[in-house]
Image (tube, grey):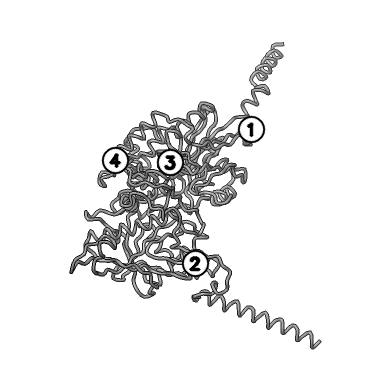
Amino acid sequence: MKKFCSLLLALLLTVLCVPGPAAQAAQADREITILFTHDLHSHFLPQSAEDGGESGGYARLKTAIDRERARRPDALLVDGGDFSIGSLIQTLYTTRAAELRTMGALGYDAAALGNHEFDHTGAGLAQMLNAAADSGDPLPALVDANYDPAPENPDREAILTAMERCGVSETLMLERGGVTYGVFGLMGVDSHDCAPTSGFLLEDMTQAARRCVEQLKDGGADLILCLSHSGTDGGRGEDYELAKAVDGIDVIVSGHTHTTLTEPITVNNTYIVSAGPYCQNLGSITLKKTGDSLLLTDYRLIPIDETLSDDPDTAALVEDWKDQVGETYLKRYGLAYDQVLARSDFGLATPRSGVQEGSALGELVADAFLYAAEAADRAAGREYQTTVAVTADGVLRAPLSAGDITVSQAFDVLSMGVGGDGTSGFPLVAVYLTGAELRDALEVDASITPIMPAAQLYCAGVQYAFNPRRMFFNRVTDALIREETSRTGPAPAAGAGGGQEGPGYTVTYTDTTYSEIDDHRLYRVVTGMYSAQMLGTVKGKSMGLLSLEPKMADGAPVTDYNDCILRDENGSEIKEWYALAMYLQALGTIPGRYSAPDGRKAVSRSWNPAELLKNPNWITLLALAVILLAIAAAVLVVRFILRRRRRR
């Protein structure tokens, strides 16, 4: 009886310890919410949207975050990289770490590093991390599994020390509401290519991801989250291939390509999500976890627009950053953050990516570069040189809206990069190309744009025409260079134009003409530092079919683009954005000619054989020879077959 009672008691205790069906369901079914952004690009303040409203702004983003966390208190908040570079506040990046500290104030749990975090080189990243650590403010954890300083990087030890101070790690375990999240970060191949001055080496994404997934699973992660700065393209892309190749990743927050996914991409049991760039949306994905399976129950993109109120604490923090920008970066230019430079009765939109046509904004910027180059020549006492100014689609980052145009808006258009002086903004450089190379540069626009939209060019000082239906690398049909000559002559009579009359009174006239490009002459080309560096890579990328080798004025190859920087009368770099600001200020009111492309780039899509075969180069001639040989071979084969049939 004693043994029987002991056995009965043991069974009773066992039954009591086993959870009932409801308890089992509660334990097995867990709801998981991840809030996400990527490609914020220092968009601290709202910007005008195409629909006439406003988009973005961190004070409004904070309001949206707080609302979502009120609904789901255990939601994770993460970012997919490129949180810096895109507004004047980025000028505090290396000294104040404004972006990372603001993300900490917004409540971010983790973030990846993007290519623009390396615009100030790896050493600049280290300065930012140290500034963030020194602040003592709350910061998001940074994850980076496949991007490390190269062994030969002279700043390697300083960078590694800063990364350790700021807690940068390959993987991260976070617990929220009884769910253990395993988080890791990746840099993509194209992203690495877009960070040529990082001084870092890229490990294969797939290899790094498999290592991280294994570590996180061994650590007991319930859900594995990848913050990837790699991107998707038309539903595929690097992150699609990553999910396809690596088992065990539950969610990928995909940045870099500025993609907006209204529905997740699902591949190999992985959800790939993107919310769009520039703080336009806050993404939210909710999953129901039952055992080892995940079921999507909710996916939303929450617009950050004028319908949201500003969080007062965040708004005050942003105003403080603005004041610091005025006291530091802008002081040297004698400008203020919200100072009005010009007014426009119409908006100038950013170019439509990959669409081969003119752009009023691109033409305005190219004209501004030409204006700045001529101003620099006058300040240095140099005579006028025939000059072509060039800007590219990939560096035009924001539109100019109708109404007052401020200093900060001019900066937003050309916010990328850092100069040789270590401060934000690519400087203008002057390099020299032969006429033949200048034609090849125009071929980049005509032939490369369909496969690399960021390469689309907008020029001043040259007008040209091309047909995208012509042979690859032989699409430009006409190209003329603008020449200016000065002459003196008698002043016009007062009634004929306001001049003064009198014997011996003369004035200087400037005559503008367009002439054929001389293939053997050196022409000065003014562009931004980044675009100049990209011109130097064209020969390799085109497998030698196009030949561009930027040169100095004496014809020697450029070895250091810092030697080509345009400077003002004080010896300071003329930044791309400042060239635009100077030009806008000189205009005062944007002329109506910039309301639409002015025809300096003419695109024809005619199938007229005369146009298709006009001015053929060796590529077209070779292609025609191959086609003719193929036709001749086909004719010979047909004749041979017919003869054999007749003999039979």
- Give the class, few, some or many, for how many residues have Cα within 10 Å of label 3's Cα (few <14, many ≥20): many
* Badge 2 amino acid: Phe
Instruction: Please say if 21 is above or below 542.
Output: above
Helix, strand or loop at label 3? It is: strand
| Front position among marks 1 and 4 | 4
State which tag comes first along the sequence, 2 or 1: 1
Asked if residue 475 lies left or right of residue 341, the reply is right
Instruction: Please say if 514 is above or below 147.
Output: below
**Residue 466 tag number:** 2
**At which x and y percent is residue 505?**
19, 66
Mark 3 in CB contact with mark 4 (< 8 angstroms): no
State which tag comes first along the sequence, 3 or 4: 3
| Separation (CA) of disc 3 from disc 4 | 19 Å
Helix, strand or loop at label 1? It is: strand
Residue farthest toward the top in the current orientation of the protein: 1
State which tag comes first along the sequence, 4 or 2: 4
* Badge 4 amino acid: Gly
Q: Which residue is mark 1?
A: 290
Which residue: 33% across, 52% down?
587
**Residue 326 tag number:** 4
Q: Quadrant of the N terminus?
A: top right
- Give the class, few, some or many, for how many residues have Cα within 10 Å of label 2's Cα (few <14, many ≥20): many
| Separation (CA) of disc 4 from disc 2 | 45 Å
Q: Which residue is mark 3?
A: 47
**At which x and y percent is residue 194?**
43, 54
| Separation (CA) of disc 2 from disc 1 | 59 Å
